[in-house]
Amino acid sequence: MAGGANDSDIIGIDLGTTNSEVAIIEGGKPTVVREDGEAILPSCVGLDDAGTVIVGQQARNQAAAAPERTVLSIKRLMGSGTQVRMGTDAYSPQEISAFILKALKERADRALGRDVRKAVITVPAYFTDAQRQSTREAGEIAGLTVVRIINEPTAAALSYESGAAGSRTLLVYDLGGGTFDVSVVRIEEGVVEVLATAGDNQLGGDDFDALILERLNTHLETELGLEHAREDRLLQARLRQAAERAKIELSDRPWVRVEEDHVGSVDGEARHLAWELSRADFERDLQPFVDRSLQAVTTALQDAAVRPSQLDRVLLVGGSTRIPRIASVLAERLAQEPHGEVDPDLCVALGAGVQAGIEMGQDMQAVLVDITPYTFGTRAAGELYGEPYAHQFVPLIRRNSKLPATRTEVFYTVFEDQEEVDIKVYQGEDPDALKNVEIGTFLFSGLNRHRDAHGQGLLFTYSLDLDGLLHVHARERATGREIRGVVENALGRSTDEALGAARERVSALWGEAGGESPAAAGDAAAAVPADVARAVEESLARAESALDAAPAEDREEMIDLMEDLRDAVREGRVDQASELRGKLDEILFYLE
Ligand code: ADP
Ligand code: MG
């Protein structure tokens, strides 16, 4: 409970691949913020016709018509170091995510009537160090201090059972748009402890859409004679949406009909799509994915040393668990019906809200004990399958250890005059270090400055913090001297300058855009985005103090402008407010 009592607001954010939500704490309880009755903000960012940033449903609506200026499922690229194109420019995944976070933050601002600066953000338990780091950076770019990163299944469990008496063991099965997580969680007198977790961060509803899309494309090629259908980006985006709609419908009925006009033409003759898919066929395609997820369930149960019969509850989280086959297969495997009373869309955000409340110092009747889903380790010369091998994986912090976790190891320099050592850190379970995910290289230099230091060794301490991020410290044993390590290539970590530049870029684009655009936010949102409001406040304050000294005709104009500006802000006319502020600033420029 870092920080203890804290009177400033902290919000809880579920930053999903497909959908995101934000929870605030009201009256000691988390509530998911709704706007126009809608809690879900599609995790979609785009530029509209005028080049203005749009987030949410409005961006999603244009995805098929304008794929080149719309970004979907950005979470899948977090930590990858690649960039995405939106319109004419390229953006990092952190920047795109920052737009989503800004939209959520402003929802919370409007609901609370205050400017929120801190957040708890959830990530899939299986997110790597680089992915977690990128999530934290996205928060910073959005102007939010990320006080804590927690795992999504843990959050789901927190929302469900915080404060319940007695001891319970839960299995949380979270199948969303892009990722799959399964965790075994024990709750004892309000203490939530994750016993084990497993999953796959490349498995989710997007893959199921792709299955249907594949069938559609085959149909277009073989039945309609549209040989180049797959190369038509616009058509593919349209079909992908049709595929998702079909998938969702199949959750409620045994077959679905997909109809799309003008999907192409052959010899100048238009072709239309009218096609049927049965649930049975879809489920057959789905089976390999279902099997993969069941394997993860078995792994998590084994790691936790829990038998299915010892589970008190099975929680279904994530939109894809609405597929009937998922629930039935799980029920069969675990010999009990999954639980239906948690809202699969909102429980992760609610749990993030519970954690936010804890961080605020409120009594949420819950304490979170989380674990690492990965083993962290280094490499050394050793053996692999009985053969000498230079990159043997040496585990330091094992999978399913409680967080925070530390481990200290002694290391001896190889040569008497060795002044440098670099430590490569990996996460994963393979005995071959090179088959695990490399987190980065930590370089320690200035060793052996003291003659007798060699031979006594260096103490390396690896610590995994509460957010699942790794830190490495070294100390010279002979002298007790701390040796500063330099992170050479901690993958996914940006420099402060890069973050600062990203923050400026994002707020500049945002300032003009005005947050969730009025169309997306609805008329009820009669408030300008916090960034604009702040800028207006600043201009008004400057104008106040310049007023007395101003020439009479300027003063009159200023007073009029200030009045109009205050009205515009009060009535949520964002564009006008920006324009008026511009005019006011112009006068101030000559006066100050
Ligand atoms: P994430 O947490 O990854 O953002 P969600 O938990 O919001 O994702 O789930 C989104 C996924 O759930 C999407 O792939 C969506 O198509 C799918 N989905 C939503 N409702 C249904 C449904 N009724 N049947 C099948 N899939 C659904
Ligand atoms: Mg989710």
Image (spheres, rainbow, N blue to C red):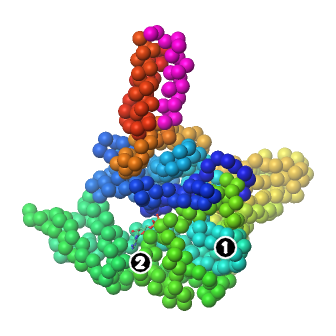
Q: Amino acid at mark 1?
A: Ala
Q: Is residue 397 visible?
A: yes
Tell me: residue 53, above or below residue 408: above
Q: Secondary structure at mark 2?
A: loop
Asked if residue 98 lies in the magenta stretch, the reply is no
Q: CA distance from mark 2 to mark 1?
A: 29 Å
| Magenta stretch bounds | 533-552
Residue 181 is situated, as x and y percent measured from the top left of the image, at: 54, 72
Camera-nearest label, 2 or 1: 1
The residue sitting at 50% across, 32% down in the picture is 535
The residue sitting at 67% across, 76% down in the picture is 186
Which quadrant of the structure image shows residue 297? bottom right
Q: In the figure, is residue 546 to the left or right of 300?
A: left
Residue 413 tag number: none
Q: In the figure, is residue 486 to the left or right of 418?
A: left
Residue 323 tag number: 2
> Disc 2, ligand 1: is the CB inside 8 Å?
yes
Asked if residue 547 lies in the magenta stretch, the reply is yes
